[in-house]
Amino acid sequence: MAMHRWNRAARPALWITLMGAGAAAAFASVDRAAPQAPAVSTPLRWRLNTPAALIVPESKALPAAVADKFGARARSVEARAQLRAYEGAPPVIPHATVDMNVQTCRACHAQGLTAGDKVARMASHTYLQNCTQCHVEADGLASLAAPGDPPKPINTFVGFRAGGHGGTRAWTGAPPVMPHTTFMRTNCISCHGEFGYDGWRPDHLSRSNCVQCHAPAAEFDQLAPTFGKADLPDGLSVPLP
Amino acid sequence: MTSSLMTVDQLLTVDRRSFVKTAAMAAATAMASRDARGYALPLLEQAPSSLAWNKAPCRFCGTGCHVMVGTENGRVVAIQGDQKAEVNKGLLCVKGYHVGLAMYGKDRLTTPMLRRNGAMVPISWDEAIETIAARIAANPQGFSFYGSGQWTIPEGYAANKFVKAGLGTNLIDANPRLCMSSAVTGFLSTFGVDEPPGVYDDLDQCDVAIMWGTNMAEMHPVLFSRLVDRRARGEKVTIIDMTTRRTRTSELADHVLYFQPHGDLAIANGIAHLIIKLNGVDSDFVKRHCNFRQLGAAVDANTAPDMLGVPMTFEEFAKAVEPYTPEKVEELSGVPAEKIRLLGELFARRDLRINSLWCMGFNQHTRGTAINCIVHGIHLLSGHFGKPGDAATSLTGQPSACGTAREVGTLCHLLPGGLAVANPEHRAHAEDHWNLAAGSISAKIGYHAIEMFKRFNTPTDQGGDVTTIWVQVTNPGHTLPNLERNFLRKKDLADKFLIVSDVYPTATTSLADLILPSAMWVEKNGMYGNSERRTQQWFKMVEPPGEARDDAWQTIAVSKALFDRGAGMKDKDGTWIFHTQGRDEQAIPIWDWAHYYDINVDERLFDEYRQFSRHKHKDLAPYAEYVKSRGLRWPVVQQPDGAWRETRWRFSGFDDPYVDKGKDFQFYHSVTKDDKALVWFRPHEHPPERPDAEYPFWLCTGRVLEHWHSGTMTRRIPQLHRAMPKAYVELHRDDAAAIGVLSGDMVTVASRRGAVDLAAWIGGRGDPQKGHVFVPFFDETQFINMVTLDAYDPYSKQPDYKKCAVSVRRKV
């Protein structure tokens, strides 16, 4: 649960190389019809500790993501939910993939990067080797699409949604507890770091041991006796009356 | 925790009626446990939701992952991998993460429907039950039950008892016949008793894993991850992928060996040849624990030799495999001789632990029994057996192919607990457990799946003596091979009657005369048994939609209607075979849906069924033990302190309580009755149909990660459907160039039996060898089973969906 590999010596160089090579084209948009925002209009991405010369703010005004932290947080909750059947489901892949080679995922998602307005988030469970076991294309077989294809299914499932509120605090100023499960989400910077979500980045990214101050809420811990909010025989966890 | 000391029955009888809703029962349970602790549990100040979590095994494949099911306001709203489950340790695959969505397709069947003048009209449950009872009572010998490895254990037990005790026939079979039966005949021929000696723990401990024609990365992804994730921990595991096409499994394999269809028989014999040549025979193990075996002479041209064969000596065995030199095997299989040597050298090394794994590639094979036997044989010969990591393990495709079809014995030749219809002693055991008069269980083996449907699709006056089939939890109209012959002809046969219990409209319901809407997965109580002998349990968590009801209830209700008509369904004292009473000795009317959940019918059926499990040392624990666990692997044997202990390595003295004290190994169900396993010689043979000038390509059918079997559930899940919306045909790029097609172009794949149009995919999910094509079978808009061959293994009666000859042309 530590912010491991927070070594960014090589990062700006990589980012520039990829951008220079026009890597943005490799990122298929979720909504293919949506116009691509020009790369230059993306103001400031958080790249703390990067050489100052590489950060060129357009004005002295705070970036939108900082000025409207709560709005950004709500938009991030929504963006995140768009790719998931329910909170906790593995997100679908919003771009085309090389269908067979799972190792290609790592090219972008091992460290994370941005390209234009697209962000490849850093994987939060890199110890798992078979990425495509859980993550599938949002729009697979698009290259084989034909007019007579089977219709999209109609399903009435309504998934559990995260509330979007932050973690609870014991008092104003106390470090909040983590408001979500940490199983397979042990790499905090996947979502809270540079290539994470607007509104979710802390103002103290330089600290590297997150769990020193932020405890995971036990109610999300399956191995904790309060999981499911009742202490019941193993295998039978249901809410209190 | 107090409740762990109470049996489930006690918990439930606190207030019998309260079991109508799980929540109500949970309330009672929660009170009990709170009382015991003497304090209320603290709730976090800001609880994010009223989500409740319960354990259940996944609805899909035979891996047997446990999921945590999140419910809110009577609906499933979230799924998590269950971190307490040993099988998956918190991880799932994409199907498992979306399993909760499988219940919420918009077109769920919610009312019984009867075909009248060609149209399906809604009818009442009472009328539906009476219609079935009248049909069966009129001709019990013409009635067949057809189920699947998706029957829960209690559902399968109820159906089996319905047919074998209630009607006195053996006219029941299930789709594991299309899926697992060659693995069964392999285990029976080798060890004298079904199911793998090894377990999934072998994946954690092997040095070498051999994929014998299985694409584990897509078909059993959680188990594949259990293997490959070891590499991230710095462990070394060598993966050898033996395959006819490049797959996602090949991507993570150290060696990929492409072979030609039936080349597996040659490769395995080649390994036996090299084990002997390289002094790799574990002579001590072989001398003490193995006999050698081969088939005897064929009885006549139409009758295969007896499955249990005739003895041979080690010297004769060595002579039989002598011709399978690496060079000869290369010629027969297409795998380079040096790769065959590599395999032989691995098996000859005693310091490595080798885990062989297979699934449909071996089982859907006209020599399926043979290839299963040979691979068990090379493990025994080289001593790679019965130590953690050393195992030959078949994987299953359905959540309870093992638990229900194989263990409960919902097949035409089996009785519960692995007992055989053909064995008079076994029939006597069953009559005893079921309180039936001696001789009431028929000695006549019923019809296996293909035979059942062939007869159903043959006019009654021309030998088609199966006139009524009741299908539960499966979709034969999609999954049988050669559909025109084995399913569609029924359409024109007026006196045939097809009853289908299902949750969605399917290819099978399209020809049904009566459709019954069923509850599924966590809409009912259930139990499954996975590939590693693990029996699992779950409770009902949400109500089924509309008038959908449990399959077991449907069976029990028809049984009662037959009993009331005087048409069987009674024991030797005249009592109804599903008679159930409460602790007050009052009969509970479980045939009446309003009272079905007055008690836990699953628990009653299971605790009756588990008495059968002792005969073959497949001991099951009481129901209550499974409530507490994430499954237990049989034999589960009670210890002196009262605890129930599961068994991981069967036949191994260090773990299996049925091995005599002091012995390292004991095959206590040995065919030869001397505690020894059989090492079989079976020759390489060619498949019954091979490519020729007219049909020049090999066709292999199979599965994809996103869809489960005929896709009736997964194609209704948006995330899965959008990822894999339709079937396709994979072509080698040279073949594609030769016939002038690019990815996305439509081609016609045709065999002697039928044809289907598909989009070509070149360099896609998989990459077949030149001269081969691959088509996934999940898509009900493009039935590849119009094309497949229905030739089957002579012993397992399992058809071969993996190889037949086809032509591939640009669609005109």
Image: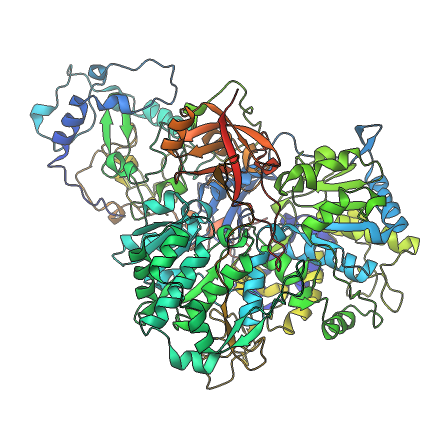
| Left or right: residue B688 compared with residue B464 | left
Which of the 4 image quadrants contains residue B740? top left
A229 in relation to B384, above or below = above
Q: Residue A187 in the image: x percent, y percent?
A: 28, 43
Q: Nearer the viewer, residue B292 or B353?
A: B292
Number of marks present in the image shown: 0
Which of the 4 image quadrants contains residue B194? bottom right
Q: Tell me the residue at 42%/63% (across/down).
A: B269
| Left or right: residue B359 compared with residue A165 | right
Q: Residue B122 in the image: x percent, y percent?
A: 80, 31
Q: Nearer the viewer, residue B489 or B436?
A: B489
Q: Residue B21 in the image: x percent, y percent?
A: 67, 48
Q: Nearer the viewer, residue B390 or A5?
A: B390
Q: Residue B56 in the image: x percent, y percent?
A: 55, 51
B124 in relation to B307, above or below = above
Q: Tell me the residue at 60%/59% (across/down).
A: B403
| Left or right: residue A50 compared with residue B455 | left
Give the residue furthest to the right.
B566
Residue A184 in sight = no
Residue B644 in sight = yes
Report the coloring of the rendering: rainbow
| Left or right: residue B763 compared with residue B31 | left
